[in-house]
């Protein structure tokens, strides 16, 4: 199972310079030892593990449950290897805010410096862009991406660590990706590495789940049918947007799936279910009402749908990769596939494991003790071998023990 999400409380303020300097210094020493012991490809792979990444940040003295661990740890590691990337064989592009948008250019620049084949560089850039698109458009969990870091080795192994924020509940969620071959990854089905989260949402349109395959297949068929045919279905949902919102809530809160509307009068069908709609939870209904309002009011949507039907993408990944296609476009196609053609997507939050609640009671699954013990052992060995002040070394070992 390849998944990876972590949720943390949002931080206010900045990391004090003295702490950042120490994180860079210790991070540099630990990176040297890790690469010497395990090699650059294994280093990239370990960064993709949410538990490993979290543990490393904590050992470097940052709060384990704060969103700043992601951004500060990435920045510290990037600074720690600056000027020695070629020597170490690892490279880090991107970062927080505006820096995240420079990731493709930074990858391309490293491709030129390293004289990588253009096809390899292009695939690395594509991997960076697609991982961001998937987490912002296919996992519709109300987290807005604001941090994107791309780690890669000379051999083409890569890891993405990106983070989104939800300002309403003041939390951040982290997404981890990994591939040892840029040409061998399915971006649109179960693509993440590892799972960790403090918060679980009741309603998340999760289009990377295997359960959502039919919904995505129908979406492609809708695009293939042509613009005029697709817009007939769009207009049908727009005409009955309020009823559709209630229908979505019914399908998600009932133990029985509502039948598809193909060949039926939408208004008549909805009328048969009014007695059920009255029982819906107001908050959940409001969420789906917003989903439909966003869908119906978007004038830009029609231009994008016209564009994608003209380009006729071969598969769902090709559809997502088209410039301009984002969450609204994907949601519109997904709603038509679900409500009219009965292809329900998954509404299960892809987050599964919580750092806060652990797994000591085997919920949602037992703790993987072997992985945890191995992580602790490797970090302890790395710190002991690191060339740092004995006092700082002792503090780091105590943080691991704690």
Image (cartoon, rainbow, N blue to C red):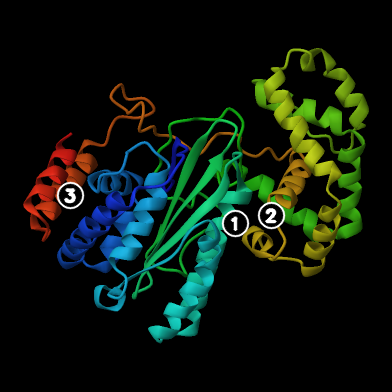
Marks 1 and 2: CB-CB under 8 Å?
A: yes
78 and 365: which one is in front? 78
Q: Quadrant of the N terminus?
A: top left
Q: Is residue 183 above or below residue 71?
A: below
Spatial CA distance of label 3 from label 1 is 33 Å
Say the numbered circle drawn on residue 133: 1
Percent of width and height locating residue 354:
39, 32
Q: Quick one: SS at disc 1?
A: helix
Say the numbered circle drawn on residue 326: 2
User: Which residue reaches farthest front?
Assistant: 17
Instruction: Name which residue lies at 60% across and 32% down.
Output: 168
Mark earlier in primary sequence (3, 2): 2
329 and 142: which one is in front? 142
Spatial CA distance of label 3 from label 2 is 40 Å
Instruction: Name which residue lies at 86% across and 60% down.
Output: 226
Spatial CA distance of label 1 from label 2 is 7 Å
Label 1: few (<14), some (14–19) or many (≥20) C-alpha neighbours in 10 Å: many
Q: Quick one: SS at disc 2?
A: loop
Q: Quadrant of residue 157?
A: bottom left
56 and 319: which one is in front? 56
Q: Is residue 38 above or below residue 11?
A: below
**Mark 3 against mark 1, which lies toward the viewer?**
3
Q: Quick one: SS at disc 3?
A: helix
């Amino acid at each position: 199972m390849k998944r990876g999400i972590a949720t943390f409380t949002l931080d206010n303020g900045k990391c004090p310079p003295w702490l950042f300097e120490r994180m860079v210094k210790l991070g540099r020493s630990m990176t040297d030892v890790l690469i010497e012991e395990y090699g650059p490809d294994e280093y990239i792979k370990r960064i993709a593990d949410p538990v490993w990444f979290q543990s490393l940040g904590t050992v470097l003295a940052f709060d384990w449950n704060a969103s700043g661990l992601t951004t500060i740890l990435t920045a510290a590691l990037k600074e720690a290897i600056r000027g020695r990337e070629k020597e170490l064989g690892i490279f880090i592009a991107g970062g927080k805010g505006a820096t995240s948008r420079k990731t493709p250019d930074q990858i391309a620049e490293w491709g030129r410096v390293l004289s990588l084949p253009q096809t390899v560089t292009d695939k690395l850039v594509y991997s960076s862009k697609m991982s961001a698109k998937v987490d912002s458009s296919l996992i519709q969990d109300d987290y807005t991406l604001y941090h994107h870091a791309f780690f890669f080795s000379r051999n083409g192994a890569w890891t993405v660590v990106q983070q989104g924020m939800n300002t309403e509940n003041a939390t951040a969620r982290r997404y981890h990706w990994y591939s040892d071959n840029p040409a061998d990854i399915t971006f649109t089905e179960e693509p993440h590495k590892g799972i960790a989260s403090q918060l679980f949402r009741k309603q998340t349109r999760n289009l990377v789940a295997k359960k959502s395959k039919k919904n995505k297949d129908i979406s492609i068929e809708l695009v293939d049918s042509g613009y005029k045919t697709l817009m007939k279905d769009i207009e049908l949902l727009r005409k009955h947007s309020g009823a559709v919102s209630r229908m979505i809530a019914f399908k998600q809160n009932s133990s029985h799936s509502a039948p598809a509307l193909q060949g039926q009068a939408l208004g008549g069908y909805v009328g048969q279910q009014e007695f059920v709609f009255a029982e819906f939870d107001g908050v959940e209904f409001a969420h789906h009402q917003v989903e439909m309002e966003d869908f119906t009011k978007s004038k830009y949507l029609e231009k994008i749908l016209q564009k994608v039907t003209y380009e006729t993408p071969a598969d769902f990944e090709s559809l997502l990769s088209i410039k301009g296609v984002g969450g609204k476009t994907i949601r519109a196609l997904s709603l038509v596939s679900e409500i009219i053609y009965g292809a329900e997507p998954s509404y299960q939050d892809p987050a599964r494991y919580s750092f806060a609640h652990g797994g000591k009671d085997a919920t949602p699954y037992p703790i993987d003790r072997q992985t945890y013990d191995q992580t602790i052992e490797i970090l302890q060995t790395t710190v002991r071998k690191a060339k740092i002040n004995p006092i700082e070394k002792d503090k780091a070992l105590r943080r691991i023990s704690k």
